């Protein structure tokens, strides 16, 4: 199986931040957490829904889905007699991402407070926490945090497989049900019918930490960072060449990217949104601001907040990522079983300069074929990455077709059109 071009981190650098990461020097213990924020208040579901809507709190797992909508759906379903379930997803299957791991290590009680407060509001009595097998310190930290608490609900910890798609929502529900930790076709949203058919509110650690901050600190504190249109902060994982330690930073929405990205990255090709993300030339990103809406409008969604500066040619790096992604699928749906391996071969043919097989048209055709046809978004994300490479670096792609490469140190600024 192809290895990830960016290894799963064994450690992470975390900078103090304005909200979630404020006061991290006091350590991750419950006493320090209560000293900083006080006791966890009880909040009713309608009050929570109203606050989430006013502050436009969105999920931080990649799709930026409005959390209020998800909670409202689960609340409506639970009013019809199905007791809801709350899930904290720390599986972080994307190897380049470290933000949820950072929260587990530095801010476990903020994450758990968000989930527990929401469980109280919903009337849920079951909390599930999913930790990654390949990041053992995350599980250790969360188990230690759970042992410090006295939440009156049944709590269960599950260990997710070391696989890119293991953290996908349906794959997590499969794990919780005792089946292989792989995505399956979803016939309805988890908030309608999730774990054992019950309404299930499943979110990643940062989303729960944002809810925790809102419940503990109030709306004014939450909105102290960000803009009127996008209040609050977001976590980013900044990743440099493979082998180096990733850095997790917290920034308010609206912050110029030029103030966030290391000056040493100047001129590099950047991959925004991780392995399912899109290439963005340095000059393009540093002219803009950290914004879910603006990045989505530009066709370069922030995803789970990974920004990668690989330090090698973006064409060859893309080929290595697609190899890895093709090997990570559950191999259950046609686009993954046949399409992604073929796409990986086609991208390699271009990157490696094979004059016959190295056909950009074949890449485009395969990317179109796999899109929108899987049971989960894995093929779509892979196709997005490949298309962005073609769009951002057409001249370099053409050079590769002729057996040449000018981006060996990752210093292509790109010519996105
Ligand atoms: S699209 Fe791929 S990863 Fe997703 S469920 Fe189907 S085979 Fe698995």
Image (cartoon, rainbow, N blue to C red):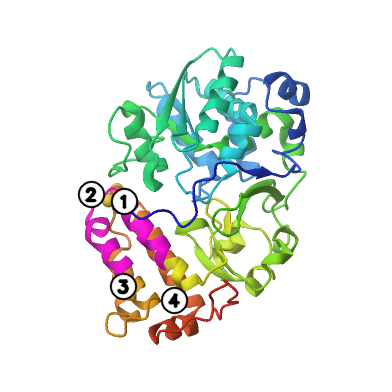
Mark 1, residue position: 329
Dot 3 or dot 2, earlier in sequence: 2
Mark 3, residue position: 346
- The residue that appears at 38% across and 46% down in the rendered structure is 165
Q: Label 1's element?
A: loop
Tell me if label 2 and label 1 are in contact, CB under 8 Å: yes
Residue 390, which numbered label? Answer: 4
- The residue that appears at 44% across and 80% down in the rendered structure is 397
Would the CB of label 1 be found within 8 Å of ligand 1?
Answer: yes
- The residue that appears at 50% across and 41% down in the rendered structure is 69
- Between 373 and 382, the one lying in front of the other is 382
Dot 4 or dot 2, earlier in sequence: 2
- Between 63 and 97, the one lying in front of the other is 97
Q: Quadrant of residue 173?
A: top left
Would the CB of label 2 be found within 8 Å of ligand 1?
Answer: yes
Dot 3 or dot 4, earlier in sequence: 3
Mark 2, residue position: 332
Q: Residue furthest toward the front?
A: 243
Give the total of numbered labels. Answer: 4
Q: Label 2's element?
A: loop
Can residue 299 be spotted in the picture? Answer: no
- Between 199 and 278, the one lying in front of the other is 278
- Between 122 and 90, the one lying in front of the other is 90
Q: CA distance from mark 3 to mark 1?
A: 18 Å
Q: CA distance from mark 3 to mark 4?
A: 12 Å
* Region of the chain picked out in magenta, as a range: 319-346
Helix, strand or loop: magenta stretch: helix
Horizontal placement of 154 versus 196: left or right? right
Q: Is residue 309 above or below residue 62?
A: below
- For marks 3 and 4, give the one nearer the viewer: 3
């Amino acid at each position: 199986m192809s290895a990830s071009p960016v290894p799963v981190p064994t450690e992470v650098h975390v900078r103090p931040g304005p909200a979630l990461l404020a006061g991290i020097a006091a350590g991750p213990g419950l006493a320090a957490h209560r000293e900083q924020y006080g006791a966890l208040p009880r909040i009713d579901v309608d009050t929570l829904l109203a606050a989430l809507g006013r502050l436009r709190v969105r999920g931080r797992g990649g799709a930026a889905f409005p959390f209020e909508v998800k909670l409202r759906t689960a609340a409506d379903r639970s009013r019809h007699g199905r007791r809801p379930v709350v899930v904290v997803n720390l599986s972080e299957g994307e190897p380049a991402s470290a933000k949820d791991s950072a929260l587990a290590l530095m801010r476990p009680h903020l994450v758990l407070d968000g989930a527990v407060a929401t469980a109280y509001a919903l009337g849920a009595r079951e909390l599930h926490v999913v930790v990654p097998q390949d990041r053992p310190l995350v599980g250790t930290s969360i188990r230690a945090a759970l042992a410090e608490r006295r939440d009156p609900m049944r709590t269960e910890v599950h260990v997710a497989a070391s696989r890119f798609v293991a953290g996908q929502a349906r794959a997590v529900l499969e794990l919780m049900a005792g089946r292989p930790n792989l995505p399956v076709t979803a016939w309805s949203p988890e908030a309608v019918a999730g774990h054992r058919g019950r309404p299930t509110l499943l979110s990643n650690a940062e989303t729960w930490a944002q809810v925790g901050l809102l419940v503990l600190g109030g709306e004014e504190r939450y909105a102290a960072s960000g803009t009127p249109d996008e209040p609050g902060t977001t976590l980013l994982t900044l990743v440099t060449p493979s082998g180096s330690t990733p850095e997790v930073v917290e920034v308010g929405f609206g912050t110029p990217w030029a103030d966030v990205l290391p000056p040493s990255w100047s001129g590099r090709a950047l991959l925004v949104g991780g392995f399912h993300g899109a290439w963005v030339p340095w000059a393009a990103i540093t002219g803009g601001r950290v914004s879910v809406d603006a990045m989505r409008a530009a066709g370069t969604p922030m995803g789970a907040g990974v920004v990668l500066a690989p330090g090698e040619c973006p064409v060859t790096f893309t080929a290595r990522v697609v190899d890895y992604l093709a090997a990570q699928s559950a191999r259950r749906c046609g686009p993954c079983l046949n399409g992604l391996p073929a796409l990986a071969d086609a991208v390699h043919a271009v990157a490696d300069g094979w004059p016959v097989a190295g056909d950009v048209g074949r890449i485009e055709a395969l990317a179109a074929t796999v899109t929108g046809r899987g049971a989960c978004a894995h093929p779509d994300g892979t196709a997005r990455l490949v298309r962005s490479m073609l769009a951002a670096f057409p001249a370099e792609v053409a050079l590769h077709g002729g057996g040449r490469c000018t981006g060996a140190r990752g210093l292509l600024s790109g010519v996105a059109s």
